[in-house]
Amino acid sequence: MELSARLNRLSPSETLAMSQKSSELKAQGIDIINMSVGEPDFNTPDHIKEAAKKAIDENYSRYSPVAGYPSLRNAIVEKLKKENGLEYTAAQISCANGAKQSVCNTIMTLVNAGDEVIIPAPYWVSYPEMVKLADGTPVSVYAGIEQDFKITPAQLEAAITPKTKLLILCSPSNPTGSVYNRKELADLAAVLAKHPNVYIIADEIYEHINYIGKHESIAQFPEIRDRVIIVNGVSKAYAMTGWRIGFIAGPEWIVKAVNKLQGQYTSGPCSVSQKAAEAAYTGTQAPVEEMRQAFQRRRDLIVKLAKEIPGIEVNVPEGAFYLFPKCSSYFGKTDGNRVINNAAELAMYLLEVGHVACVGGAAFGAPECIRMSYATSDENIIEAIRRIKEALAKLH
């Protein structure tokens, strides 16, 4: 019963573990408010569902090309041109089973044993694990709440070594909701321009959940454009998490390599989901804006309420649907039964005592924080923060 060293290097996903634990408590009849999962609580818009039904009736039930149907890739090309001002061809697009596979495909395609991959922290839990899977070395660069969780050009410059192969930049960010503006991206691009051997994965899956206006892509800067691989998909913007469609847009030689890799282990993504994604990109964008407005209202609500909790530090996230408060002032405190030593223990305490599921920040490279998803109703947010405040008040 010996597992591979590759698997033993991986940590289990803490976000999925907390979600599982909260489901178990729910099954016992306990009223849990789950703020642990990064998933819109809206339903997929009707016109997208109709396109999927039509695809079934039209027998889109066979293998698609590995990179996805040409019609979907052309729809993505149009989206990138219209929304982002970026010129790509269908040959520079490869679709996968969610943006998660798109990120992993790219890492597996570019990273060799010993290559370093710079990952700004706080980061999404899976980035360092994917790098380990490729035998690479994750190098985290930490930006705390005092700098809005965004790394500076000087920090990036200091982290680059002759072994650096890749930078993974997520904006808007999971877990912090921070968004890099055009000037900040231009300054990072200026550093990267000096290092022609460093590639950039731009994870833009939260692009449309943005509260500061236009989304900015680091792919817009011509001096590094041929080294940027954009990752995006339909999960967050169109409430299509379970449909599993993501894509990369990048240099054709990288896309060809990704297709070669994907051709050996999953082939093309679900045929029906592709037709649904095509409708998402080519149809009305009104539901996207409606959901964005709802998320912004919830952001304002949770920030206001969380700022009223003594001992936690909150910034104002500019995108995505996460709050990432600093809560280290509670470490070392006790309710008489248990001592809270770290964020994971605090998250477990909030689950078992407050009946609210959050995720400890250590898994995101920020051990002093916890992540709460506000992709839930206003009523749930109000009740969850009330419970958290009450549970924390018992610690002394």
Image: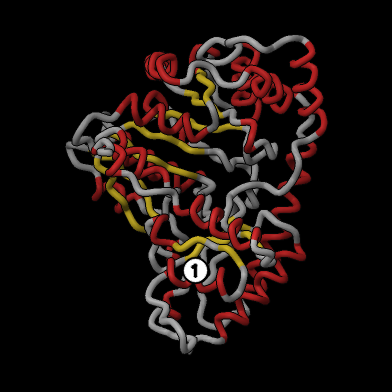
Q: Is 244 positioned to the left or the right of 253 in the image? A: right
Q: Is residue 221 above or below residue 379?
A: above
- Residue 55: % across, % down: 75, 16
Position in image of residue 108 (x %, y %): 34, 28
Task: State how the image is colored.
Answer: secondary structure
On the image, the x and y values in percent for residue 243 come to 64, 31
State the image quarter where residue 236 is shown.
top right
> In this view, which residue lies farthest toward the front?
1
For badge 1, the amino acid type reads Met
Query: Is residue 12 in view from this perspective?
Result: yes
| Above-or-below relation of 254 to 141 | above
Front-most of residues 214 and 91: 91
Residue situated in front as seen by the camera: 164 or 188: 164
Residue at 67% in and 47% down: 40
Residue 323 in view: no
Residue that badge 1 annotates:
348
At x 31% / y 26%, what residue is drawn?
A: 110
Between residue 226 and residue 287, name the one nearer to us.
287
- Mark 1 residue element: helix
Q: Position of residue 179 (x, y in %)?
A: 53, 50
Task: Judge whether 279 appears above or below 120 on screen.
Answer: above
Tell me the quadrant of the picture where the N terminus can be found.
top left
Disc 1 residue crowd, few under 14, some 14–19, many 20+, Cα 10 Å: many
Which residue sits at x=56%, y=39%? 205
The residue lying at 25 percent from left, 35 percent from top is 135
User: Residue 317 occupies which quadrant of the picture?
Assistant: bottom right
Q: How many marks?
A: 1
